[in-house]
Image (cartoon, grey):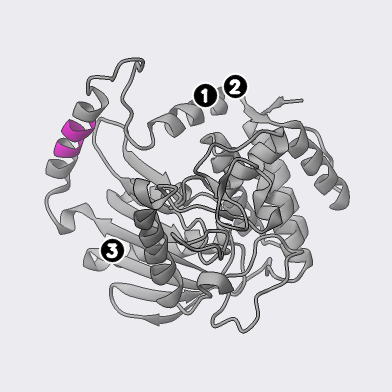
Amino acid sequence: MEKIVDYAALMSLVEHVLMAMGCPSDQAKTGATALVSADLRGIDSHGVARLSGYVRLWEAKRVNASPNIAIIHETPSTAVMDGDQGLGLVVAPAAMDVAISKATQVGTGWVSVSNSNHFGIAAFHAMRALEKDMIGIVMTNASALVAPTFSKERMLGTNPICVAVPSGDEPPFVADMATTTAANGKLEMLQRKQLEAPLGWIQDAEGNQVTDAHALKNGGALLPLGGNREQGSHKGYALGSIVDIFSAVLSGANFGPWVPPFPAYVPMPENMPGEGLGHFIGAMRIDAFRPAADFKSNMDLWLHRFRNATPASGHEQVYVAGDIERAMEKERMQKGITLVGAVQNDLKALAEKMSLSFTI
């Protein structure tokens, strides 16, 4: 049964769980804000539903709750950071801080991160650049659940990309997307609700497209964006590969089929070539290219024109990337966040395990 939960109450619970794991209070607040931002924006698959997974990784000693995040190589505009096995929810904000600092000084900043973990939604990290009149670009690799076009073997993660672009009077452009037809978290939501998946999301162990939301548990795989070759899956495969290379080959993290799995009970791959998960995080100062006021005026015009494009028959509105999530964030901040029964039970069990009060 679904329940509406107040944002502040949910934040408090997540923050206290992270502190019970050993996170310093400032990092716990950062991590909780990053995680709950997914629920606020309607990306329930990447929000508090993931919290128990982070705890299990910590229990398996695959997450360091108090990491020493460090720059191990840098130039004026670039850096490589070692996340020290920290929560990606904490490591990625630290990397964006470095990217913003470098962009402030020299126009752009690019940070490749190794030895990290799952970081929630990419939009949270990319949007932090907006406050500085910068474009934020964020991507991360993930454990191998995706079969390349024509393959039966899982080789890539869902490998999301986010680009956040500032504007003036119009709400900003925020494109946050997996490079698969659907993120694995969306599949997990269907499993919780006992629903089938749309055709084009997944294939079975023999490479046949199926609608069974549990197909991955039987040797199946997610499909690249496009679903099949005729509908452009080779392009989704290429995009996922780009993310993997930028996030991991460039940083020294694990890549391809060697990326550590998110479920703590899944054995680690053998002969891993790198350290942890990888991210690639960038910030670009607008006035490094043209006056910010001129850019934002043109960006407003772009956004306004696209939002007012003539809708096709049967549709009321044309949206720009980020519009639906922004509306959901406004609604849920005012009315509360919807949690399905399975997630409520999960959070209650976590609170009991950590000897915390459960009041949501």
Task: State left or right for residue 326 relative to residue 211.
Answer: left
Q: Nearer the viewer, residue 222 or 273?
A: 222
Range of residues picked out in magenta: 298-303
User: Mark 2 = which residue?
Assistant: 335
Magenta span dominant secondary structure: helix
Check if residue 301 falls in the magenta segment.
Answer: yes
Q: Amino acid at mark 3?
A: Ala
- At 53% from the left edge and 75% from the top edge, which residue is drawn? 254
Instruction: Give the spatial CA distance, label 1 vs label 2.
Output: 6 Å
Determine whether label 1 and label 2 are within 8 Å by CB: yes
- At 47% from the left edge and 71% from the top edge, which residue is drawn? 113
- Vertical arrangement, residue 230 with respect to residue 69, above or below: above
Could you tell me if residue 143 is visible in this image?
yes
User: Mark 1 = which residue?
Assistant: 331
- At 36% from the left edge and 15% from the top edge, which residue is drawn? 314
Please report whichever mark, 3 or 1, sits nearer to the chain's N-terminal start.
Answer: 3
Mark 3 packing: few (<14 Cα in 10 Å), some, or many (20+)?
many
